[in-house]
Image (spheres, helix red, strand yellow):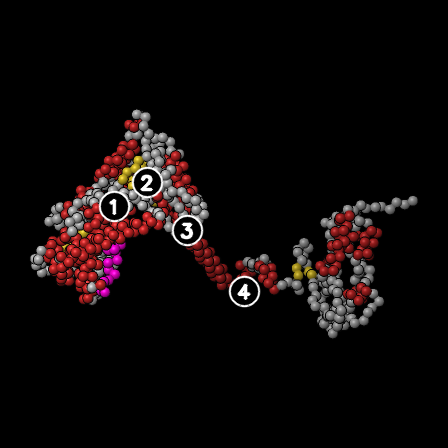
Amino acid sequence: MTVQPQVTVPLSHLINVLHSLKSSVGSSSRVTCKSRSPQQPASDPQLHCTESTWNLQELGLSDLGTQQLDELVNRVLPRFNTHDAPFLLGGQTAWRTTHLSSHSFFYNKHGFACSPMHVSAQVLSRQHHSPLHSVCAELHQWPVLVQSRGFKTLRTKTRRRQSKLGHPLESEGYTPSFMKGFLSRDKVSEVESLDSLVINKNIPDGQQDSFKRGFAEGFLKAQALTQRTQDSLRRIRLILLVLLLIGIYGISKTPFLSVRFRTTTGLDSAVDPVQMKNVTFEHVKGIEEAKNELQEVVEFLKNPQKFTALGGKLPKGVLLVGPPGTGKTLLARAVAGEADVPFYYASGSEFDEMFVGVGASRIRNLFREGKANAPCVIFIDELDSVGGKRIESPMHPYSRQTINQLLAEMDGFKPNEGVIIIGATNFPEALDNALIRPGRFDMQVTVPKPDVKGRTEILNWYLKKIKMDPGVKRASIIARGTVGFSGADLENLVNQAALKAAVDGKDMVTLKELEFAKDKILMGPERRSAEIDQKNKILTAYHESGHAIVAYYTKDAMPINKATIMPRGRSLGHVSMLPENDRWSETRSQLLAQIDVSMGGRVAEEMVFGQGDITTGASSDFDSATKIAKMMVTRFGMCEKLGVMTYTDLTKQSPETQAAVEHEVRVLLKESYERAKALLKSHAKEHKNLADALLMYETLDAKEIQLVLEGKTLETR
C-alpha cells in the first residue's frame, strides 16, 4: 500500500491565489509580442510572446506538489497555443472579428483555441521544487484575453512591460491625459557630468577650459542670486509678520471697531489705570460744599488707620448727583489726584454691548484690577445707564445681568479694602434702590450749578488762561449776567470769546467778545445771511417790543438783558431776560409775571395788525406760558379751587378732576392775556418807539431800552 504525500494549505491562501490568478488572466496581464522584422510577411500568424514569472512564496503556496499543481492549473487557467493564434486582418492587426460560430465557446469568446499550458522554470530558488511557483511566475506575461462582444472590433489594446525586475508596471494605452503630467513629474532627467557635456557638445580642446570656467562662474552667480532672493523673501516675510502683529494690536486697542475682537479673544480683561497727579482740588471751583464732602474720602485713602482705630468702616461708594456740566467727573479725578492713587474711569454705556455677558465680564475685570491695585478710585460715569431699575422685559432678557454683577462686586469688598467707588448721574430717580442703599453707596453728594460767587471763581480761573484786556478787571459783571450757567457753560463762554477775538484779528479778549459769546449761548448764533422782507421785520419788531414793554412795566418780571430782531437760531427775534440775583425759589406773582411777558408778543400783534394778521410766532410763548400755569395748578398748589394738592399724572385722575385742572389753567392764561393787553394799551406810545428803535438798530441792550422808553434819543452807531 503506497501512501500519497499530502500538503496542508490554508483555505484562505488558496482562495486568494485562485482569485488573483483569474483576475490577472482577465484584465491585469499584457501581451508582450516581439516586433516583426521588415522581411516577415503581414499574413504570418505566428505570435512571439515573452515569458514572465510569479513569486508564489509571497502567496504562501510554495509547498504544493507537482500533481496538485497540474490539476489546479488545468482547472483554472487556459493555455495559449501559438499555432492557433488569430490571423492578421489586412496586414495591420493580429485580432479579427468572426461572424461564424466555432466548435467551442472559448474560441467564440477570444478568437483562438485553448491548448495545454507550458510551465516554465522557477524564478526564485527554493529548497524543494514547486511547479505551481513556476507557472504563477509567468502568468503576468500571458496574452490578454479580450472579449469581443457581438460583432464589434477591439476598441483598445493593452501592453505591459517591465524594464527590470522589481520595478512597478507601467501602462501606456490607458493612461489619462491629465495623469501624464503628474506621472512625469517624478521622472528625474539624467544629469550629465561636465566632462560628458563638453564631449557631447564637440567643444575644441583649446576652449574647454574657458567653457568650464564660464560654466562655474555662471553657476556661482546663479547660486548667489538665489541666495539673495531667499534673503529678500525672508526679510519680506518678517516685515509682513511684524505688520500683522501691529495691526492686531491696533485693533485690540480701538474702542469702537474691536468690540467683537476684544470680547472673543479676551483682550478686554485688562483695565489700565490713570494717574491724576495733575488734577487736584485747586482745579475745582464754584462747588465748595462738594469739595468739603469729598475731602473726607481723600483722608480715608491717605490715612485709613485714623478711622479704623476708632472702629469705623471706610465708605465703599460715593454718589455724585447734579445737572450736566457741574463738574462731577472733575471732582472724581481730583479725589484720585489728591490721594495720589490710581484712577479707573468707566462710562455706564461701555458695559453693555450687543453680546450677552459682556457687561458683567467688564465689571468683573474692572473690580479685579481695582482690588489688585488698592488703594484706588473707580469712577463710573452716567451710572443710571448701567444701574437703572431692574425690569422684566421680554425684549431685554439679559439686561439685569450687568447690574446684578455690579451689586455683587460692591458687596464682595472686604471692610477697609481701600477701593472707593464714585458714581455720577444727573437722573438719580432712575437708579435701582438696591444700588443706592447704605453699604454700597454710603455717601450722596449733590453738585448744583454755581451761584454768583462760584461763577465768578470759575470765570476768573478760565480768564487767566487767555489774553484778557487789562481794562476788564472784574469777572463779576459777566457772572451776574450768566444766571443758570454751569461750569461747562462758563468754560464755553470764555472759549467762544477767544475765538471771536481771533476771528476779528484782535490781540486780546475784551468785554465785547464776552458779551457776544454770552448772547450766542443764550439766544443762539446770528443768521445775518437770512433775507427778511420789510413787512416781517416790522411785525417781528412789534412782537418783540411787546414782550419788552410787558417785562419792563410788570413789577415782578425779570429784568431785560437784551432785545433783538436779528434772526438767531430758529427764531426771527428774541428778548433775553436775566434775574439780578440767583433765584432759589419763585413766588406766585413772579410766575404770573412770566406768563404775562409770554402773552405780550401775541397781544402786540393783535393790537397793531388786527386779528386777521396774527402769526405763528407766538407758539413757543404759549408753550412756556401753559407749562407754568399747569405747574401752578398741579404741582405748586397755587389754585384756590383745587387746593393744595398735587396731580403728577393727570391720566390717572377722574374725568371731573382733569376737566377742573384744564379749566383752572385756562383761567390763568386768560387773565394773563387780559393783563398784558391792558398794559400795552396804556403804553402804546412807548411800544411804537421801541419797535422803531429795533427796526433802526436791530439789537438793544437793557440801558438802551430804558433810554427809549424814557423818551430819550440813542447815540448813532
In the rendered image, the quadrant that contains the C terminus is bottom left
Q: Is residue 76 above or below residue 556?
A: below
The residue where tag 2 is placed is 423
Q: Earlier in the sequence, mark 1 or mark 3?
A: 3
Q: Residue at x 74, y 64 (%)?
A: 146
Q: Element type at marker 4? A: loop
Q: CA distance from mark 4 to mark 3?
A: 53 Å
At label 3, the amino acid type is Leu
- Whether tag 2 and tag 3 are in contact, CB under 8 A, the answer is no
Q: Residue at x 28, y 34 (%)?
A: 297
Judge by depth and name the residue closer to the eye, 380 or 211. 380
Across and down, in percent, residue 417 comes to 35, 32
Q: CA distance from mark 1 to mark 2?
A: 43 Å
Q: Earlier in the sequence, mark 4 or mark 3?
A: 4
**Closer to the eye: label 4 or 3:** 3
Q: CA distance from mark 2 to mark 3?
A: 39 Å
The residue where tag 3 is placed is 244
The residue where tag 4 is placed is 201
The residue where tag 1 is placed is 640
Q: Earlier in the sequence, mark 2 or mark 4?
A: 4
Q: Earlier in the sequence, mark 2 or mark 3?
A: 3
Q: Is residue 512 above or below residue 149?
A: above
At label 2, the amino acid type is Gly
